[in-house]
Amino acid sequence: MPRSILACAAALLLTAVAAPARAAEAAFKAAYASAEAANAEAGKLRNQWTTAVAALAAAKKAAEAGDFDKATSEARKSEQLSRAAIFQADEQKTNWKLMEIR
Amino acid sequence: MTGLAMAAALIAAPSFAAPAADAPDPAADLKAFQKYFRDKFPKVKFEDFVNGPYSMDEGLYRQWKEKEEFPPYEFALDLGKELMAKPFGNGKTLADCFPNKGVGIRQDYPYFDTEQGKVVTLELAVNQCREANGEPPYSYVKDEMAAVTAYMAFTSRGKPFDVKIPDDPRALAAYENGKRYFYTRRGQLNFSCATCHVQSPGERIRAEVLAPALGILNAMPIYRSEWSGMGTTSRRFTSCNSQVRGVPLKPQDEDYRDLEYYLSYVSNGLPISGPGARP
């Protein structure tokens, strides 16, 4: 009996440690999926930014090394950059004419 | 600048109403384009616009004259000449695919191929020829491709660009698409080709003097010390995209071919000067 209580306690302790780690991984996965989608959308508009692509790669690398906090922050940065790229591409669909020599 | 700050800056910029779309008129574009550069640089002789950064700066111009005495692209000319004549597996040659065996024809490219329904650049024509004869294509950015296009440019020196837009709505659409690409801001720096090569030619970016967009393709391909070798038009386009932190397209992508069509057309009348040598 005491032994199984000990085992139980150990198991509880493990989940207590593992739960935040799993949450961090889940947060990363969500952030990475959004970043990838935004990057793909910028690609369809033929306007990916090198910095967005680099941040996406950095996110992946950090996740592979188990650093999900860094991975999530890189993924979020990548998504922000891609959103700006998408905004730029949409805005330039007509506004490129402002620069034309006439 | 972070992406958010960039987006904020874009949003904060007063949103001018873009001018109404008017009917495409390449001939009028050409006139306005050439006038813009003549007015901006009244001291530069018209034919000198083909010398890229060298036309903008007297010190550089002297350097260029000195370079031309021992041109660093000379080995590329020899290689290009050899490759033009070297038989493919089937006995035909690259020269066989071109009018006049590829000699003195650079000024006619790119052209709109009504059969393929697209713009064919000199680089694309070279690889189409190789593939049609069962040979693997060259890399678009340097080495053999730079060598054969250097040789073709060299044998065309002095001939004015003579790019035509046939009476075909697809050709006009390609021209307009190239123009759009040229003036479209891109990359995290939010620059278009025109930001650097129309608004700022003659100014320095780090150690480099910006070339004017007028005549900007006449000297291609070029030797650059920074590349320690030759680079093609494809190489220059992709590196200029990367400079503004934009992911470049694939060499000879439709947008790049249309861009080359536009830029070459508005330089009609200016002599081919390639290959060029750059600091």
Image (tube, coloured by chain):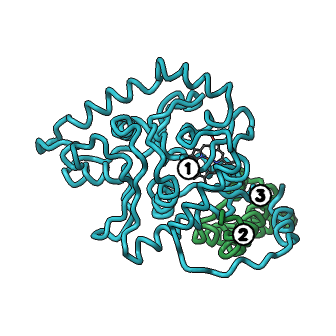
Which one is closest to the eye, mark 1 or mark 3?
Answer: 1
Residues under numbered marks 1 and 3 in contact, where contact means CB atoms less than 8 Å apart: no
Q: In the visual, does A15 lie left or right of A38?
A: right
Residues under numbered marks 3 and 2 in contact, where contact means CB atoms less than 8 Å apart: no
Chain A: colour as depicted: green
Q: What is the spatial separation of the Cα atoms under label 3 and label 2, in whole angstroms?
A: 34 Å
Q: Secondary structure at mark 2?
A: helix
Amino acid on which the number 2 mark rests in the picture: Leu
Residue B31 against residue A94 in the figure, above or below: above
Residues under numbered marks 2 and 1 in contact, where contact means CB atoms less than 8 Å apart: no
Q: Nearer the viewer, residue A39 or A17?
A: A39
Q: Nearer the viewer, residue B233 or B90?
A: B233
**Residue in the image at 84% along x and 72% along y:** B11
Residue B260 against residue B200 in the figure, above or below: below
Q: Secondary structure at mark 3?
A: helix
Q: In the visual, does B139 lie left or right of B37?
A: left
Residue B37 in picture, x, y percent from top left? 65, 50
Which chain contains the residue that carries disc 1?
Answer: B
**Residue in the image at 60% along x and 80% along y:** B22
Q: Is residue B219 visible?
A: yes
Chain appearing in cyan on the rendered image: B
Residue that mark 2 sits on: A98
Residue that mark 1 sits on: B238
Residue A63 in picture, x, y percent from top left? 71, 56
Q: Secondary structure at mark 1?
A: helix
Q: In the visual, does B271 lie left or right of B31?
A: left
Q: What is the spatial separation of the Cα atoms under label 1 and label 3, in whole angstroms?
A: 26 Å
Residue that mark 3 sits on: A74
Amino acid on which the number 1 mark rests in the picture: Thr
Q: Nearer the viewer, residue B36 or B131?
A: B36
Near mark 1 (Cα within 10 A), the count class, few <14, some 14-19 or many ≥20, is some
